[in-house]
């Protein structure tokens, strides 16, 4: 069959059984497989119980109390924290900022990372050096990165505005202009896509060359080959990038904090939900309230991720079998 | 079903060549730079007084008591506490001091917070002078009022504003160890001269500040390239608001310290002045004054006429500033005629020390605390390494300040200051609310009156919550 | 012949493995140098060089800053390349804190974490992808859900829990959790595992191999790039982690490099920038070297050639 046609398909559903029998093994073979499943996932399950489960449950309980960070008295307040949260316009401001940043930087980041990965997958002399160079931003200490980007974004002496001046455009105030502070953060974030680039590069290694060859022989152009051969084979990594990007986007904190000092300057334009949470926990010492913020964020992230998984998940092609 | 055998092994040689080439290129590049006429020296990196810093220390052996102190800073300020601890250990033989380096995360003392939460706090900890009511309100601080009285200390021994801040709650919970006078105003004589102003005459009132700024202002298109002062950039929007609010004679708290009053008419007027200033120069987002520097404040760029500075920043400029661009004079911050009074804009910052209640060595900690805050040797050591003032007005350090003309203004500010930032359990809420609302007003998104009204509601609600939870 | 038509030749010339190759085709010595090819090469290099400058900027800043005198660091306007270079930042920085000891401490944390993360995420990733058992997706969903709870919310309860079992003051809270699966890496490995055609494992099962053998002998070798990525990322995360060591390490003899860097930061305006840049540069070198030499594993490794249906 011609590879220029999309090759994503859906696999068959498991054989129809009742809900209960599907979850509990019956036959000897099912029990064996179940045992293996437990064996392999045992570390994570034990880890959940030992390390993650307890604190998560505690934080959920805390969200219904007025616990403070210093461990004093703790009273049950029911839904008060949540209703206070929904009445706080700073919270909605932070949510809006976070949404803006996430919706723009996640797809943009993936596109840039993919572009770089493709670029590095070509045959060029000194490729190894270029790969290191593109990865370096991810490992430069955030302190150094923040300083250099404050300089890059400086309205008068910064590189970006100087380059724009060459084309006759007057650059904006970036971090000192409430309308441009978020794009400034997005640019800063884009520069750190080295991590994602590495993952996509690893995925690109799994694209079969002979399929690409065959496509060329069939007369496919570069874009068609990309869309119909490359993309399906890296779609598992693209899904990974999207979901983890969304999760990270809604918890975005470190870069905003380092670049703008933790107050959401200027004029609250960079107040993201992560900073709002940090403020309520460590400036205002409200452990209960900040736990509520965290759990509201959790619900939002979960809903968005499920949506993303539903939309993208069915188009992902897993090496010959849709799962 | 057919399967392909794995690909044939590659020639690794080509790869290694490129690696070798890379290393060769680095070496060549390094040599080129070296030969390009740069002088190479071995000094000039850090100031001489920064050699041999120590940030933590173990207690002297064989002492009956050991107290632990969290040191939250690196650099010379961090070193100050190790020096202080050693000096204390030399002055007596019953107590040893362990200094634990517990750096800040961002600007929060996460180590201290988790230690208190886990019930294992240090015996002495730092906090800023307006945040101790928050700790005290949660019941984790040892009260010091009776101890201070027993030591024969009282209002007469501390600068007036310092004592006011120490006694803002029902008891005394923290002692000032380093006081930051915020702010004297520094002006750049070179900018004054170039703008046609008398370089030896700084503004005394806000009106004069405005008139001088009008003459200093220079623009290129709609970008501001030289400005009299940046009223909203005095170490953050909230600190800027405090400075101008006090300059206009405003009060941020009711007299009994129970209600926040950011909507005080003088404060609204102050914010209106700042907003008008921003509008007059064409908007806060069109400043193109300086590039960010890692060590010097913006006034060192030579494009700002007047700016307040902390002691550390001022000393950095005196030491490393470009003399062709900056020549500084210092005076008290201007006041609004008819509303404020000379020196009314000054408020006090710095750091206090407190004793967590769960400490097991409170008496020994109190002894060390006295040495640190109200002894000649202690305050002198702190000044030497921390460069900030003591709050104890009998300290010989204040004589030294009087002698040095460059920093004498800080002593004057300390002794004449009348104002303090709101010293309440929700001080941080006040600061964050002010920060967001003032900055929104400056950027023209909201009117000053509404901005400050919002701050009032936020803070008073938080205050009521706190009282309810901790009564 | 173009590169596409002769991947083997192209691969041989570039010295890089490129997917599957037919061993029966001859390997020519070099390609023809035509104008379109030169233009293509120039265009590629131009783009790469411009991008490289953008990405290298902070590194250049850091390295040049490490050689600047204090006066030059604070200069207005900014000086990219100073005329006077000093080695004083390095001599000061190297004696500011016990660099070698902190380096060792950091390794003590990073290397086991790296191994633990790779082992556990491969195991668990396999368990939620290629074993057809009913709880496969349920466990996976729960693990991903734990990623969605913001870290600062669980930080304090977690600290108290570690304190209750006496692990504060040790390296344990920083290393042990990696052996129990990190959801981010489990997700990563799962995606790679799912991309392996069933045909390979079916063949092995028909040959009578059990799950464990399939895992070790068939699946793992195919996922070297992904495993390498996991190990690299975990190493980097542990290497630059500041909050973990800050919370859990109490004795300064245990401190890590990231904590050592904070030594240069005093109160506001008091930062010793030159030495900070110098030590940051020194710390960066092992990472860059590690990545440079580890790249191979991303590219090599047996790739999955297309299976003819």
Image (spheres, helix red, strand yellow):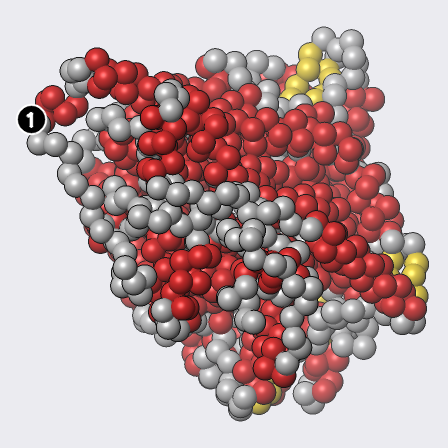
Q: Is residue B298 visible?
A: no
Q: Residue at x 18, y 18 (%)?
A: A25
In the image: residue C192, left or right of residue B410 = left
Pick the front one: C76 or B339: C76
**Could you say where residue C2 lies in the image, as x and y percent from the top left?**
55, 71
Chain at tag 1: A
In the image: residue A118, left or right of residue C38 = left
**Could you say where residue A150 lies in the image, as x and y percent from the top left?**
58, 64
C10, above or below B1, in the image: below
Quadrant containing the N terminus of chain C in the rendered view = bottom right
Pick the front one: B20 or B141: B20
Q: Is residue C67 visible?
A: yes
**Could you say where residue C217 lies in the image, as x and y percent from the top left?**
48, 28
Pick the front one: B331 or C46: C46
Estimate how packed mark 1 is, as few (under 14), some (14 to 19) or many (20 or more) residues with alpha carbons within 10 Å: few
Q: Residue at x 23, y 17 (%)?
A: A29
For residue B158, what is the image quadrant? top right
Q: Secondary structure at mark 1?
A: loop
Q: Residue at x 80, y 62 (%)?
A: B25
Q: Residue at x 25, y 41 (%)?
A: A323
* Residue topped by disc 1: A18
B224, above or below A228, in the image: below
**Could you say where residue C224 lies in the image, as x and y percent from the top left?**
52, 39
In the image: residue A168, left or right of residue C266 = left
For residue C198, what is the image quadrant? top left
């Amino acid at each position: 069959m011609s590879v220029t046609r999309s090759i994503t398909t859906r696999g068959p559903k498991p054989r129809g059984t009742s809900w209960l029998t599907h979850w509990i093994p019956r036959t000897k073979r099912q029990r064996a497989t179940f045992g293996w499943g437990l064996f392999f996932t045992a570390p994570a399950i034990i880890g959940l119980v030992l390390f993650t489960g307890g604190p998560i449950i505690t934080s959920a309980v805390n969200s219904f109390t007025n616990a403070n960070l210093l461990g004093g008295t703790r009273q049950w307040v029911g839904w008060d924290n949540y209703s206070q949260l929904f009445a706080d316009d700073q919270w909605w401001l932070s949510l809006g900022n976070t949404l803006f940043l996430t919706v723009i930087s996640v797809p943009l980041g993936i596109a840039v990372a993919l572009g770089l990965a493709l670029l590095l997958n070509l045959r060029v002399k000194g490729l190894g050096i270029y790969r290191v160079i593109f990865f370096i931003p991810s490992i430069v200490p955030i302190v150094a990165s923040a300083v250099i980007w404050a300089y890059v974004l400086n309205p008068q002496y910064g590189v970006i505005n100087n380059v724009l001046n060459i084309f006759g455009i007057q650059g904006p105030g970036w971090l000192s202009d409430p309308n441009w502070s978020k794009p400034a953060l997005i640019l800063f974030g884009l520069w750190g896509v080295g991590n994602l680039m590495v993952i996509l590069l690893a995925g690109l290694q799994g694209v079969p060359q002979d399929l690409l060859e065959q496509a060329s022989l069939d007369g496919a152009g570069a874009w068609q080959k990309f869309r119909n051969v490359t993309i399906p084979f890296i779609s598992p990594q693209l899904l990974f990038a999207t979901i983890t990007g969304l999760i990270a986007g809604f918890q975005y904190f470190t870069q905003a904090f380092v670049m703008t000092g933790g107050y959401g300057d200027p004029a609250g334009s960079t107040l993201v939900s992560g900073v709002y949470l940090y403020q309520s926990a460590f400036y205002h010492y409200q452990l209960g309230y900040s736990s509520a913020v965290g759990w509201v964020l959790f619900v939002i992230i979960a809903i968005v991720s499920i949506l993303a998984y539903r939309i993208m998940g069915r188009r992902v092609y897993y090496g010959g079998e849709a799962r | 079903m057919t399967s392909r055998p794995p690909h044939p092994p590659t020639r690794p040689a080509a790869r290694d060549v490129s690696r070798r080439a890379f290393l060769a290129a680095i070496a060549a590049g390094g040599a080129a730079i070296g030969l390009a006429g740069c002088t190479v020296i071995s000094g000039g990196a850090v100031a001489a007084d920064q050699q041999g810093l120590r940030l933590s220390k173990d207690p002297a052996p064989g002492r009956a008591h050991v107290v632990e102190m969290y040191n939250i800073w690196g650099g010379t300020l961090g070193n100050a506490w190790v020096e202080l601890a050693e000096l204390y250990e030399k002055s007596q033989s019953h107590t040893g001091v362990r200094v634990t380096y517990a750096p800040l995360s961002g600007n929060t003392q996460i180590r201290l917070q988790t230690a208190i939460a886990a019930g294992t706090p240090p015996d002495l900890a730092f906090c800023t002078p307006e945040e101790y009511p928050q700790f005290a309100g949660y019941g984790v601080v040892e009260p010091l009022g009776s101890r201070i009285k027993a030591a024969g200390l009282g209002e007469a021994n501390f600068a007036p504003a310092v004592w006011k801040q120490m006694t803002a709650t029902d008891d005394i919970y923290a002692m000032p160890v380093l006081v930051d006078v915020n702010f004297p105003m520094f002006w750049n004589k070179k900018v004054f001269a170039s703008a046609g102003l008398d370089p030896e005459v700084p503004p005394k009132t806000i009106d004069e500040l405005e008139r001088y700024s009008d003459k200093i202002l220079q623009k290129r298109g709609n970008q501001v390239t030289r400005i009299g002062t940046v009223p909203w950039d005095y170490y953050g929007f909230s600190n800027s608001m405090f400075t101008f609010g006090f300059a206009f004679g405003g009060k941020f708290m009711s007299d009994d310290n129970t209600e926040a009053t950011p909507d005080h008419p003088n404060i609204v007027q102050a914010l209106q002045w700042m907003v008008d200033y921003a509008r007059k120069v064409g908007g806060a987002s069109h400043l193109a004054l300086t590039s960010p520097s890692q060590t010097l404040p913006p006034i060192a760029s030579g494009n700002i006429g007047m700016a307040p500075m902390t002691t550390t920043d001022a000393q950095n400029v005196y030491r490393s500033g470009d003399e062709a661009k900056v020549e500084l004079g210092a005076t008290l911050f201007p006041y609004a005629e008819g509303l404020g009074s000379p020196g009314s804009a000054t408020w006090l910052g710095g750091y206090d020390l407190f004793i967590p209640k769960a400490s097991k060595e409170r008496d020994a900690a109190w002894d060390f605390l006295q040495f640190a805050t109200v002894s000649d040797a202690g305050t002198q050591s702190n000044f030497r390494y921390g460069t900030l003032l003591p709050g104890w007005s009998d300290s010989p350090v204040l004589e030294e300040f009087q002698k040095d003309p460059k920093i004498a203004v800080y002593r004057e500010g300390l002794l004449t200051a009348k104002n303090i930032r709101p010293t309440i359990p929700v001080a941080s809420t006040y600061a964050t609310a002010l920060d967001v609302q003032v900055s929104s007003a400056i950027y023209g998104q909201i009117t000053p009156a509404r901005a400050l009204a919002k701050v009032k509601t936020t803070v008073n609600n938080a205050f009521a919550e706190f009282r309810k939870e901790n009564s | 012949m173009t590169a596409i038509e002769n991947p083997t030749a192209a691969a041989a010339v570039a010295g890089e493995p490129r997917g599957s190759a037919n061993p029966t085709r001859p390997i020519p010595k070099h390609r023809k140098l035509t104008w379109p090819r030169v233009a293509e090469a120039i265009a590629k290099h131009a783009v790469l060089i411009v991008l490289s400058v953008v990405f290298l900027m902070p590194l250049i800043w850091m390295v040049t800053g490490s050689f600047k005198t204090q006066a030059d660091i604070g200069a207005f306007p900014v000086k990219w390349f100073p005329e006077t270079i000093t080695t004083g930042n390095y001599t000061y920085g190297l004696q500011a804190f016990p660099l070698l000891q902190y380096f060792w401490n950091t390794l003590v944390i990073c290397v086991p974490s790296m191994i633990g993360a790779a082992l556990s995420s491969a195991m668990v990733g396999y368990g939620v992808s290629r074993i057809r058992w009913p709880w496969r997706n349920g466990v996976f969903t729960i693990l991903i859900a734990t990623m969605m709870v913001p870290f600062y919310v669980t930080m304090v309860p977690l600290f108290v829990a570690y304190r209750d079992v006496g692990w504060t003051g040790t390296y344990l809270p920083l290393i042990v959790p990696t052996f129990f699966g990190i959801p981010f890496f489990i997700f990563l490995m799962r995606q790679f595992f799912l991309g392996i055609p069933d045909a390979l494992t079916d063949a092995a099962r028909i040959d009578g191999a059990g799950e464990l053998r399939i895992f070790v002998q068939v699946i793992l070798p195919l996922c070297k790039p992904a495993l390498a990525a996991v190990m690299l990322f975990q190493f980097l995360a542990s290497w630059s982690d500041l909050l973990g060591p800050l919370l859990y390490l109490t004795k300064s003899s245990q401190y890590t490099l990231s904590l050592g860097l904070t030594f240069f930061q005093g109160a506001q305006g008091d930062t010793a920038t030159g030495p900070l840049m110098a030590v940051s540069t020194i710390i960066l070198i092992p990472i860059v070297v590690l990545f440079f030499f580890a790249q191979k594993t991303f590219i090599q490794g047996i790739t999955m050639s297309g299976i003819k249906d």
